Image (tube, rainbow, N blue to C red):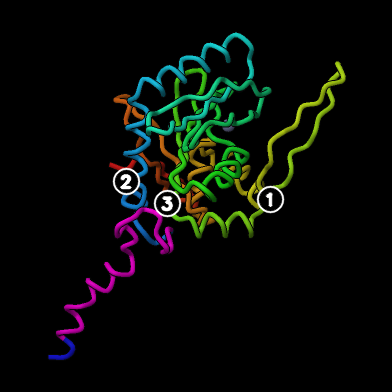
Amino acid sequence: MRIAALLFLIPFLWQFNNDCSSSTYIGVCDTTKANICILSGKAAQAATLLAQTSNYNSAVALIKKAQSAHYKEYVISFGRDSTGNLINSSVSMGNINSGHIPAIHNRFADVHIHTGEQPPSSGDLYGFIDQIITTPHYIRYIVTPMGTAYALILINKEEALSFNTFYARRAGIKHLQPDGTSVSYQPTFPQQLVNEFNELVSWSHTTRETALVFLLKKYKTGIALLKQNASGIYKTLDVIEKTDSKGHKIYLLDYCP
Ligand SMILES: [Zn+2]
C-alpha cells in the first residue's frame, strides 16, 4: 500500500522539481532542467506586444534606413513617460560593430540593427545582463538589414548574475584607424566559450544562431533568445544536442510553440 502511494506521488514530485513557471518567469530553479518554453512564455508575449506598437515599428524603420545609408549600428531605446505612455529615444549612431544605448525615462527595452546578418553577439548578451540588474523585464531587440529580428529576454535573474560572475566578459580591443580615430570592439566571452562557439560553428556546422542558443542553455545564462516569425510573433528558440548514427553530435534548433 505504501509503495503504491509512493508510486502515485512520483509524477507529482517530478512536476514539482521542474516547475519553475509559478507566478513569475524569473524563477529560481535550474533552467536547464525546466521547460524553456514555459519559462519564457510571458516575456515572449511582452516582446511580441511591444513589437506590435507604432513606436517599435517606427524605431525599426528609422534604424534600418540609417544603417543602409551609413553602414553603422544604430540604437533606439524605449521608455515610459510619467503617465505611462510609451516613448522612444532619439537615434544613437554606433560604429560598425557596437552601439551606445540612448537614455530615456523609465527605459525598459532597446532595439539595434547589425551591419550584417549576425544574430546577437556576446557584447549584446553582457550588455543585456547589465540592464536586467535594475530592470529584470528588459527586452533587447536585435534586427538585421535583411529583416531577421531577435530579442533577448531574462528567464532567471540569479543564473544571469552567476553567469556574469563565473564567465565574466573580456574587454573588447581598441583598434586605431588610419585617420587617427579608434574603434572600440565590444566585450567577448571568456576563451573557453569562444572556443566552444567556434567548434560548434566549424566542426558541427551549426549556424551562429544555434551555437548561441546552445551556449545560453548549457552555461545557464538564465537568458533566452527569441526570434520573430513571419506573423510578427516572437518565439523562443531552443536547441537539443543529439548524437547521430556515426557518433557525431548534432544540434537541432526549434521554435517553442
Ligand atoms: Zn548587437
Q: CA distance from mark 1 to mark 3?
A: 22 Å
The residue sitting at the front extreme is 82
Quarter holding ligand 1: top right
- Residue type of the residue flagged with mark 3: Ile
Please, is residue 70 above or below residue 98 in the view? above
Mark linked to residue 41 = 2
Residue 6 highlighted magenta (yes or no)? yes
Residue at 44% across, 51% down: 241
Magenta stretch bounds: 4-31
Is label 2 within 8 A of ligand 1 (CB to nearest ligand atom)? Answer: no
Evaluate if marks 3 and 2 touch, with contact meaning CB atoms under 8 Å apart: no
Whole-percent x and y of residue 233? Answer: 32, 31
- Residue type of the residue flagged with mark 2: Gly
Write down the quadrant of residue 1 in the picture.
bottom left
What residue did someone put label 1 on?
A: 190
Q: CA distance from mark 3 to mark 2?
A: 9 Å
Residue 232 highlighted magenta (yes or no)? no
Please state which of residues 189 and 203 is positioned toward the viewer in this rendering: 189
The residue sitting at the left extreme is 1
Residue at 42% across, 51% down: 155
What residue did someone put label 3 on?
A: 155
Please, is residue 202 above or below residue 113 in the view? below
Q: Label 2, secondary structure: give it.
A: helix
Viewport quadrant of the C terminus = top left
Q: Is residue 10 left or right of residue 167?
A: left
Mark linked to residue 121 = none
Q: Residues within 10 Å of mark 2 (few under 14, many from 20)?
A: some
- Residue type of the residue flagged with mark 1: Pro
Q: Label 3, secondary structure: give it.
A: loop
